[in-house]
Amino acid sequence: MRPLQFFLTLVITVAFAGTGLAVSPGKTVDFAGGSAGKVIFDGKIHADKGLKCADCHPKIFPMKKDTKFTMSEINEGKYCGVCHNGQGAFKSSEQANCEKCHKK
């Protein structure tokens, strides 16, 4: 492979390396949610509220779909709980809000 071809291949590979884990604003990602039911993250709902991917990634959430987190951590203000605290968005720890994320 010639140097220019190698360089272009390298640039393209690096540019698209993380896109396999990205969720575009119109897409969803499902997470196992235990006995409460799976959790469906809807990128469109968050984008419609004016949020951008960089508002949460990678500072709040690493760019890995297999990241594990618990309701205890969320209710302590980590992960989703950074915003879902009753001030930025609905409060994750209130029983009435469970079905907003968890689907049986």
Image: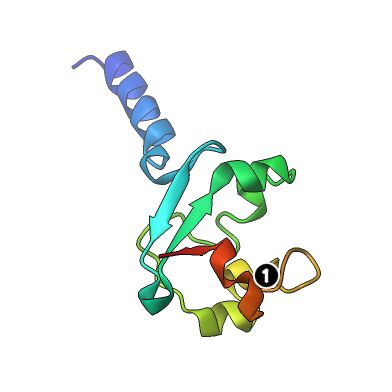
Give left or right: position of 28 versus 79.
left
Of residue 45 and residue 98, the one placed in the foreground of this image is 98
Residue 104, given in percent of the width and then of the height, sits at 40, 65
Please identify the quadrant where the N terminus is shown. top left
43 vs 79: above or below: above
Q: Can residue 88 be seen in this view?
A: yes
Residue annotated with mark 1: 82
Give left or right: position of 69 versus 50.
left
Of residue 49 and residue 52, the one placed in the foreground of this image is 49
Residue 39, given in percent of the width and then of the height, sits at 45, 63
Secondary structure at badge 1 equals: helix
| Residue under the point 57% across and 72% down | 98
Of residue 13 and residue 85, the one placed in the foreground of this image is 85
Amino acid, disc 1: Val
| Residue under the point 73% across and 46% down | 49
| Residue under the point 41% across and 38% down | 19
83 vs 47: above or below: below
Give left or right: position of 5 versus 62.
left
Q: Can residue 64 be seen in this view?
A: no
Residue 50 figure quarter: top right
Of residue 55 and residue 50, the one placed in the foreground of this image is 50
Residue 6, given in percent of the width and then of the height, sits at 28, 22
Q: Residues within 10 Å of mark 1 (few under 14, many from 20)?
A: some
| Residue under the point 72% across and 67% down | 90
